Amino acid sequence: MSRRPKKRSLTLRGHRTSVSLEDEFWDAFREIAAQDTRPINALAAEIDESRGTEMGLASAIRLFVFKRLTGR
């Protein structure tokens, strides 16, 4: 289990951004994108568009992964 989040780059609607997530969340996020046969950047852009201004992108991705894995 990773101790610290790792920063990785994503491209959202043509713009590069960095997101820090723990390895387990990155792995699960990639698996979900693969299951949905979607590029990870497209999935991240969709999450980004729906998150609003009250939540950061990393938190929104964590919640998305959590909800997908738990069915909530």
Image (cartoon, rainbow, N blue to C red):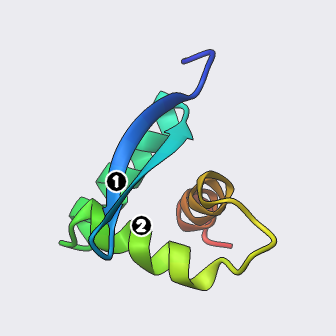
Circles 1 and 2, Cβ within 8 Å, touching? The answer is yes
Residue tagged by mark 1?
Answer: 10
Q: Is residue 57 left or right of residue 36?
A: right
Q: Is residue 49 above or below residue 3?
A: below
When the figure is inspected, residue 58 is found, relative to residue 5, above or below; the finding is below
The outermost residue toward the right is 54
Quarter placement of the N terminus: top right
**Visible residue check, residue 27:** no
Name of the residue lying farthest toward the front: 15
Q: Where does residue 20 sit, x and y in percent of width and height?
A: 54, 38
Q: Nearer the viewer, residue 23 or 72?
A: 23
Query: In the image, what residue occupies the spot 61% across and 19% down?
Result: 4
Q: Of 11 and 72, which appears nearest the observer?
A: 11
Residue 35, located in which quarter of the rendered image?
bottom left
**Secondary structure of the residue carrying numbered label 1:** strand
Q: Amino acid at mark 2?
A: Ala
Element type where label 2 sits in the image:
helix
Q: Is residue 54 above or below residue 4?
A: below
Q: Nearer the viewer, residue 69 or 58?
A: 58
| Label 2 sits on residue | 44
State whether residue 45 appears in this view.
yes
Q: Considering the image in quadrants, where does the C terminus appear?
A: bottom right
